[in-house]
């Protein structure tokens, strides 16, 4: 606190508050010239002020003045009248003898004014003229020094004692602070500074680095140099950003999820967690790829990823596109074959699709490797050799790939009907014709089961497994033609070339 000192040789002195300067008042013991009994006596006064600082004079210039006249045993009250003003400053003078003085800008030296003391009756007359001398001492400005503080990202800084702690004033004057926002305020935060130099600083959210503001110290009369306060805001690790670019490759009851590593928030990422939806199946890893298992083939899943570091866990990534786990189909079952003429019709039962629709089947023969493909459960394999036994296997295909081959079918032999028998001859007998022939040159890929001889007219027949057959019931003397067919598993051949004879007239060679 700043003080003004009043020293009075005649009366008791007193302290008085004066803003921003130390002011000394000295009473002067003087014997007034030509003072008359009962008149007021004014004594000269002296004060000391600081350059460019207000002087508040208290006690007043009347403190060392007196009035010898008494009224009913009580001293007369004195008031002051200004006679001449100051020449090197402004003066506010009051009748109680107090005054306020401010020197002209940058003036230092001696200034003065004069006054008279007047008693309370006023009719006794004024005192002598007293001179008040004000000595204006030069004022040295304070010195403000740079200050340095530290805080952490997103953390308020309370600075106490504040920026004035390392500042000085050559005259020992009390210092206060004036912020100079227009000079250099903090660019990356907010600051509140009080007159004592203490301040509160809040960095902007997420900011770290150096921030500054400036101020000047004030001693009540002069300002210091501009000083810079530097605040180092240390980074604090944040949780990572969410991973990006999440994609999933489906597998058999699983999915391989990959992503792009995010910004680590100032602390190395220590791991990732992948979570499926639906199901909440998870996997953890320190890399940017992870296999989520336990999934159901045929069910579509999306996946999100979070990253973790020492500061915490990121928010979840955007979900991946849906991925449906699947595997290759099971092998087809119940493979059956119906042989044909140089071909075979293969049928089977569709297997479990592995979580992805079956897109086709492939049938393969053994031997020969003849194939056919289809989207249904039946297929005709062509190009086979009649009479050759074949087995067949089937594989199913989906988006995951081809199944293993089915169990082989039972052997099947492609075939057709036999060729017609050859060398057909007839021998007449009593009431019958005995027909003979040679087996067909080609049995159609299947053994001949039997032969059938047919006579015309009359449609007489006989069936045999041999190459000769008697046809009974003929009429002697009637001319007949006869043919032979061979039958195998594929059916009956075409009729042989027809022969003819007349039974009653003896045997005749077929022709």
Image: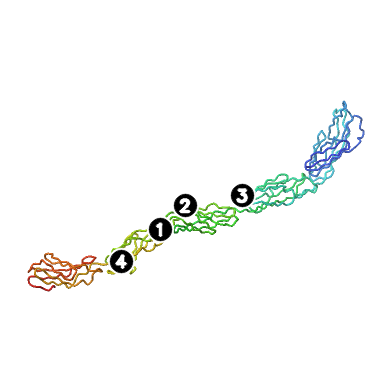
Specify the quadrant of the image occupied by residue 323: bottom left
Q: Residue 411's mark? A: 4
The quadrant the N terminus occupies is top right
Q: Residues within 10 Å of mark 4 (few under 14, many from 20)?
A: some
Query: Distance between the Cα atoms at labels 2 and 4?
Result: 48 Å
SS at badge 4: loop
Residue 488 point in image, percent of width and height: 22, 67
Q: Could you tell whether 321 is left or right of 423 in the image? A: right
Foreground mark, 3 or 2, reads 2
Q: Residue 205's mark? A: 3
Foreground mark, 2 or 4, reads 4
Q: Residue 279's mark? A: 2
Q: Is residue 56 depicted above or below 363 in this figure?
A: above
Foreground mark, 4 or 3, reads 4
Query: Distance between the Cα atoms at labels 3 and 2?
Result: 38 Å
Foreground mark, 1 or 3, reads 1
Foreground mark, 4 or 1, reads 4
Q: Residues within 10 Å of mark 3 (few under 14, many from 20)?
A: few
């Amino acid at each position: 606190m700043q003080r003004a000192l009043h020293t009075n040789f005649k009366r008791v002195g007193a302290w008085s508050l004066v803003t921003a300067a130390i002011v000394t008042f000295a009473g002067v013991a003087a014997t007034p010239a030509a003072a008359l009994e009962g008149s007021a006596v004014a004594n000269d006064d002296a004060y000391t002020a600081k350059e460019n600082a207000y002087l508040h004079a208290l006690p007043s210039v009347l403190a060392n003045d007196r009035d010898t006249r008494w009224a009913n045993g009580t001293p007369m009250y004195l008031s002051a009248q200004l006679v001449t003003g100051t020449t090197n400053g402004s003066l506010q003078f009051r009748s109680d003898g107090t005054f306020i003085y401010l020197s002209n800008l940058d003036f230092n030296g001696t200034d003065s004014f004069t006054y008279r003391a007047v008693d309370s009756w006023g009719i006794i007359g004024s005192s002598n003229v007293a001179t008040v001398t004000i000595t204006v001492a030069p004022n040295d400005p304070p010195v403000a020094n740079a200050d340095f503080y530290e805080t952490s990202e997103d953390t308020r800084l309370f600075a106490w004692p504040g920026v004035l702690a390392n500042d000085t004033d050559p005259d020992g004057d009390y210092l206060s602070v004036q912020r100079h926002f227009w000079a250099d305020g903090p660019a990356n935060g907010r600051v509140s500074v009080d007159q004592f130099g203490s301040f509160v600083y809040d960095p902007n959210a997420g900011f770290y680095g150096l921030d500054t503001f400036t101020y000047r110290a004030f001693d009540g009369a002069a300002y210091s140099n501009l000083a810079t306060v530097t605040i180092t805001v240390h980074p604090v690790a944040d949780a990572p950003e969410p991973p990006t670019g999440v994609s999933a490759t489906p597998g058999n009851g699983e999915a391989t999820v990959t992503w792009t590593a995010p910004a680590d928030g100032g602390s190395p990422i220590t791991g990732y967690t992948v979570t499926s939806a639906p199901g909440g199946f998870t996997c953890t890893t320190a890399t940017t790829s992870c296999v989520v298992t336990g999934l159901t083939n045929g069910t579509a899943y999306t996946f999100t990823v979070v990253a973790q570091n020492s500061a915490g866990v990121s928010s979840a990534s955007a979900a991946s596109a849906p991925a449906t786990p699947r595997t290759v189909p099971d092998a087809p079952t119940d493979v059956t074959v119906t042989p044909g003429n140089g071909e075979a019709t293969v049928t089977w039962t569709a297997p479990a699709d592995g979580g992805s629709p079956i897109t086709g089947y492939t049938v393969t023969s053994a031997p020969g490797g003849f194939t056919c493909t289809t989207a249904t459960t039946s297929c005709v394999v062509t190009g086979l050799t009649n009479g050759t036994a074949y087995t067949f296997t089937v594989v199913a295909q989906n988006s995951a790939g081809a199944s293993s081959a089915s169990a082989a079918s039972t052997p099947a032999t492609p075939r057709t009907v036999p060729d017609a028998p050859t060398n057909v001859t007839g021998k007449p007998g009593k009431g019958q014709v005995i027909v003979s022939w040679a087996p067909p040159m080609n049995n159609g890929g299947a053994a001949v089961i039997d032969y059938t001889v047919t006579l015309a007219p009359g449609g007489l027949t006989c069936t045999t497994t041999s190459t000769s057959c008697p046809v009974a019931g003929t009429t002697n003397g009637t001319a007949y033609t006869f043919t032979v067919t061979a039958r195998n598993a594929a059916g009956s051949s075409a009729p042989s070339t027809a022969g003819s004879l007349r039974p009653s007239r003896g045997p005749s060679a077929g022709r």
